[in-house]
């Protein structure tokens, strides 16, 4: 961590695809951005030719049903940001402006890999200012029934311990533990695809979701197993994708986290809820740059701060 500088893209790069829920075509352009600007989305082609700039922060999240949405629908929102955010966070990109001409980030192949490839196409540029981190000082936890998500102090970087437990033998109980850094993200997480059950498709369609879902961008599970002819990319692709989602959602902290994230049967809502619980108490964290604390309070061994989330997936 010591001496690390902020990064942005060396040049702009464009991607096109469809939204997994809307089914509508969308174009995004990733632009280099100034130091300390973070990740922001410029929503274009709104009614009346309007544009809206939305910071990718937990405070901007307006919905977490099946995907993470920032901004308000009435004034301009951007949905399904988690895979792109995971790619940026996993590769250590601090400052980017995402120009998007529709309401949903394209699903691409259902993973973060196409976004990683686009970032690699232009490369990264180190900037003049040091990177700031959010250091977890004491445990913070959110719960809903048997499910939980928590952030705890951790001495070495950012660790994720993600566990899922589905009541079907097609998935079952899976756990993944990793220390986040670009090589690990590329190799173990980026290519894991989103997944869903065929029995849920009709219900989702009626609710206006999954209109763009297909075997090209989703791992589909039927009564007998995986329907996709190519099968799985990893034996535990399901928990790897849940880990990918967590990386993307937790990047909405606004700076890289120094701590350990643990979840059991979590999801987008609980990922965001644990950030809300973290930032609700200033003694939970400190802002540090290159290992030196800028602001914050003394570390504490107090019992976890406890909050509640409304759903488990």
Image (cartoon, rainbow, N blue to C red):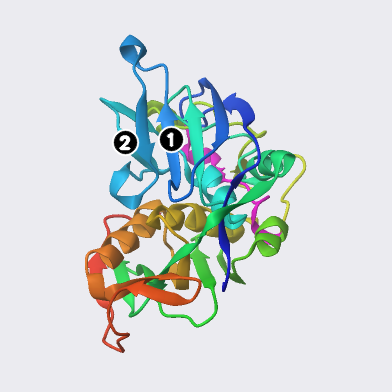
Does 277 sit left or right of 97 as displayed?
left
Q: Residue 135, image x and y in percent?
A: 41, 73
Instruction: Determine the secondary structure under disc 1.
Output: strand
Label 2 near label 1: C-beta < 8 Å?
yes
Residue 171, can we see it? Answer: no
Residue farthest toward the front in the current orientation of the protein: 128
Dot 1, how many residues are within 10 Å of its Cα: few (below 14), some (14-19), or many (20+)? Answer: many
Q: Name the quadrant containing residue 118.
A: top right
The numbered disc on residue 160 is: none
User: Is 3 within the magenta?
Assistant: no
User: 57 left or right of 307?
Assistant: right
Residue at x-position 35% and y-position 53%: 269
Decide which of 260, 310 is in the foreground and name it. Answer: 260
- Quadrant of the snapshot with the N terminus: bottom right
**Residue drawn 30% across the image and 44% down it:** 60
Asked which quadrant contains residue 11, the reply is top right
**Cα separation between marks 1 and 2:** 10 Å
| Name of the residue lying farthest toward the bottom | 301
| Boundaries of the magenta span | 188-201
Residue 208 placed where, x, y %?
A: 39, 27
Residue at mark 2: 71
Of the image marks 1 and 2, the number of the one nearer the N terminus = 1
Quarter of the image with the C terminus in it: bottom left
Q: Nearer the viewer, residue 96 or 66?
A: 96
Front-lying residue, 267 or 139: 139
Q: How many neighbours does mark 2 have within 10 angstroms: few (below 14), some (14-19), or many (20 or more)?
A: many
Left or right side of 81 for 179: right
Q: Residue at x 56, y 49 (%)?
A: 88
Determine which of the numbered discs, if any, sits on residue 41 in the image: 1
Q: Is residue 165 visible?
A: yes
Q: Residue furthest right?
A: 230
């Amino acid at each position: 961590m010591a001496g690390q500088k902020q990064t942005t893209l060396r040049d702009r790069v464009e991607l096109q695809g469809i939204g997994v829920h809307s089914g509508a075509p969308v174009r995004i352009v990733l632009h280099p951005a100034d130091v300390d600007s973070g990740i922001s989305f410029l929503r274009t082609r709104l009614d009346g030719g309007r544009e809206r700039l939305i910071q990718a922060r937990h405070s901007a999240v307006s919905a977490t049903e099946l995907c993470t949405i920032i901004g308000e629908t009435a004034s301009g929102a951007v949905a399904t940001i988690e895979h792109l955010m995971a790619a940026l966070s996993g590769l250590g990109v601090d400052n980017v402006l995402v120009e998007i001409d529709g309401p949903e980030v394209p699903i691409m192949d259902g993973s973060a890999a196409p976004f990683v490839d686009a970032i690699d196409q232009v490369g990264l540029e180190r900037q003049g200012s040091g990177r700031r981190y959010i250091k977890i000082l004491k445990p913070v936890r959110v719960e809903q029934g048997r499910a939980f998500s928590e952030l705890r102090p951790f001495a070495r970087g950012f660790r994720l311990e993600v566990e899922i437990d589905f009541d079907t033998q097609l998935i079952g109980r899976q756990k993944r533990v990793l220390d986040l850094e670009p090589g690990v993200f590329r190799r173990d997480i980026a290519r894991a695809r989103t997944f869903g059950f065929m029995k849920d498709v009709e219900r989702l369609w009626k609710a206006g979701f999954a209109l763009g879902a297909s075997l090209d961008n989703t791992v589909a599970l039927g009564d007998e197993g995986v329907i996709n002819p190519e099968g799985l990319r990893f034996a535990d692709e399901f928990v790897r994708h849940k880990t990918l989602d967590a990386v993307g959602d937790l990047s909405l902290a606004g700076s890289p986290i120094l701590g350990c994230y643990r979840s059991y049967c979590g999801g987008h809502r609980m990922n965001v809820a644990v950030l809300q619980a973290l930032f609700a108490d200033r003694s939970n964290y400190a802002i540090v740059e290159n290992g030196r604390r800028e602001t914050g309070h003394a570390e504490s061994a107090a019992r976890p701060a406890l909050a509640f989330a409304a759903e488990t997936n």
